[in-house]
Amino acid sequence: MADQYYANPRNAFWSITGELFGFDAAAPYDRRLAGLQSHGIALWDVLHTCRRRGSADSAIDPTSLTVNDFGAFFADYPAITAVYFNGAKAAELYRRRVVSPDGIQCHRLPSTSPAHVMRPGAKLAAWAVVAR
């Protein structure tokens, strides 16, 4: 589970994306990834590594950040036109530490973490932009 995105069962990421793209959010991890990929969705962290005590974004040690190589990623996948961030921290880190190619639209979405409380259905409605 440590090598899986959004493994916390209370995180709404998989239920939201499953609803938007028509796959079973409870399916094995590889099938959920395939469900995203079949709709042209890639899943990647802004950070390659960092030190963090606990799971809160506020617990990230700012001196420990190593950003993923987005330059190489965008070079390998030139058809990418948009990047969607799961929460404010990911968007902030990307904005501050990554040089985005011209033409890439960046969208900050509400965090799917259970710590980010929103009224029922509001997260799904906000995330619907990804499926357009």
Image (tube, rainbow, N blue to C red):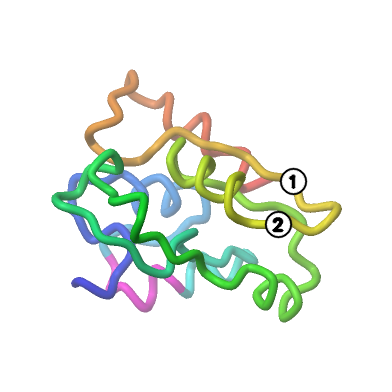
Contact between labelled residues 1 and 2, with CB atoms less than 8 Å apart: no
Quarter of the figure with residue 51: bottom left
Quarter of the figure with residue 86: top left
Query: Residue at 79% across / 68% down in the picture?
Result: 79
Amino acid carrying mark 1 in the image: Gln
Amino acid carrying mark 2 in the image: Val
- Where 102 sits versus 38, above or below? above
On the image, the x and y values in percent for residue 131 come to: 62, 48
Residues in magenta? Answer: 27-33
Quadrant into which the N terminus falls? bottom left
Query: Residue at 52% across / 40% down in the picture?
Result: 92
The reply, left or right, for residue 103 in relation to residue 3 is right
- Where 42 sits versus 82, above or below? below
Query: Residue at 35% across / 41% down in the picture?
Result: 112
Residue that carries the numbered disc 1 in the rendered image: 105
On the image, the x and y values in percent for residue 26 come to: 26, 61
The reply, left or right, for residue 35 in relation to residue 132 is left
**Label 1 element class:** strand
The reply, left or right, for residue 88 in relation to residue 24 is right
The reply, left or right, for residue 99 in relation to residue 86 is right
Main SS of the magenta segment? Answer: helix
